[in-house]
Image: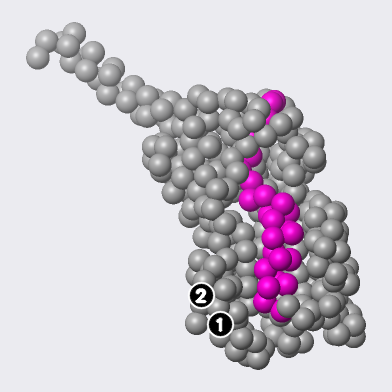
């Protein structure tokens, strides 16, 4: 080997680590902002990764993810969002409740944001300009759970046709309470039902709400959508059993945990779609041009074991409508 070729080869070898570091530095970074805890969101994170994988991105191979957890404290989210912006990340996935989305939007007007919402209208809340063209640096995957409030009341009425008093439990400050009450009030009036409105912002207040509904001898309970209720899912299901009150929930997870009945779209699917949208933006799509993604399938899930424990017989017509029956 000639001396000049040898020196060139050495120079190239010395540059390899530099090239590798440059390639690593160029790897896009997703800031995953979530209002709950890692333990509570484990299945959601898995679904998000699956969505990323469908667009060709694999965590640790060609994309990195920086996780920030609110630990069920919405007041922590603005600082966590600002921390991701300083990092800086390539894109922010704002998930796990209402607080993540406005925190991320307030932190940056340039970094793309994909957020997920369950029980509030992203247009009415001012997060996006419209469902078709969100505008700015944000887009959204939504469950539209608040818009299904009237349908859930209809199902609850079908289950307990002799009901006269129904309670609704909402969480003030979650971004969903006002919308859900606006939806459920005309539905209750249409069925001639007396509506008992209960609110809770802490676990102690949830306990107090159940004591109140017991004192008022309500016939059924409508549990509204809320990040607080999601994190206290098992506790709410236990209380419903303890007070022997038939309850309907927004999401399947409650019924799987022992709740009586749920009607809504899939939270897991929402996170998968958020992963897909995140991957599309990493590939060059603009958030402003990606329409708000809305669910197309809604599932009715009934827990027969819980129904038997409550002494309820599920009407055949309702069972026929069910997408899943848990026994």
Q: What residue appears at the point 80 percent right and 41 percent down from the top-left corner?
A: 125
In what element is the residue under mark 2? strand
Residue 147 painted magenta? yes
Pointer 2 residue:
325
Residue 135: assigned label: none
Q: For the view shown, which residue lies furthest in the left direction?
A: 1
Task: Give how far across and how far down residue 308 sits, in percent.
Answer: 60, 89
Instruction: Tell me which corner region of the image, top left, top right, bottom left or bottom right, holds residue 71.
Output: bottom right
Residue 65 pos. (x, y %): 53, 43
Disc 2: CA contacts within 10 A as few (<14), some (14-19) or many (>=20): some
Image coordinates of residue 285 in percent, x first then y, are 53, 26
Instruction: Tell me which segment is drawn in magenta.
Output: 134-160
Whether residues under marks 2 and 1 lie with C-beta atoms below 8 angstroms apart, the answer is: yes
Q: Which residue is under mark 1?
A: 304
Q: Who is closer to the viewer here, 66 or 7? A: 66
- Quadrant of the image occupied by residue 164: bottom right
Colour approach in the figure:
one colour
Where the N terminus falls, by quadrant? top left
Q: Earlier in the sequence, mark 2 or mark 1?
A: 1
Task: Give the CA separation, mark 2 to mark 1.
Answer: 7 Å
Query: Can you see residue 325?
Result: yes
Task: Report helix, strand or loop for mark 1.
Answer: helix
Is 259 on the left or on the right of 174, as rendered?
left
């Amino acid at each position: 080997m000639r001396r000049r070729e040898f020196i060139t080869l050495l120079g190239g070898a010395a540059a390899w680590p530099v090239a590798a570091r440059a390639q690593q530095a160029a790897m896009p970074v997703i800031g995953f902002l979530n209002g709950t805890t890692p333990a509570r969101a484990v299945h959601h994170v898995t679904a998000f990764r699956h969505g990323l994988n469908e667009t060709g991105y694999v965590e640790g191979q060609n994309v990195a993810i920086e996780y920030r957890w609110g630990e069920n404290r919405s007041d922590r989210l603005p600082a966590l969002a600002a921390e991701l912006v300083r990092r800086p990340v390539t894109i922010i996935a704002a998930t796990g409740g209402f607080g993540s989305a406005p925190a991320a939007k307030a932190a940056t007007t340039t970094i793309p944001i994909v957020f997920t919402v369950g029980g509030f209208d992203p247009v009415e809340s001012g997060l996006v300009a419209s469902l078709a063209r969100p505008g700015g640096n944000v887009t959204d995957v939504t469950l539209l759970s608040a818009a299904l409030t009237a349908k859930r009341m209809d199902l609850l009425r079908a289950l307990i046709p002799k009901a006269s008093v129904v309670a609704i439990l909402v969480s003030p400050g979650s971004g969903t309470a006002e919308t859900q009450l606006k939806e459920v009030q005309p539905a209750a009036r249409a069925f001639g039902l007396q509506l008992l409105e209960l609110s809770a912002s802490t676990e102690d207040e949830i306990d107090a709400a159940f004591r109140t509904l017991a004192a008022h001898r309500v016939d059924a309970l409508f549990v509204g959508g809320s990040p607080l209720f999601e994190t206290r899912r098992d506790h709410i299901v236990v209380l419903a059993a303890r007070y022997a009150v038939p309850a309907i929930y927004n999401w399947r997870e409650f019924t799987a945990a022992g709740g009586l009945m749920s009607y809504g779209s899939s939270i897991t699917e929402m996170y998968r779609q958020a992963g897909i949208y995140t991957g599309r933006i990493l590939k060059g799509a603009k958030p402003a041009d990606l329409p708000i993604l809305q669910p197309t399938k809604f599932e009715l899930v009934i827990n027969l074991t819980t129904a038997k424990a409550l002494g309820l017989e599920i009407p055949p017509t309702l069972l026929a409508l069910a997408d899943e029956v848990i026994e």
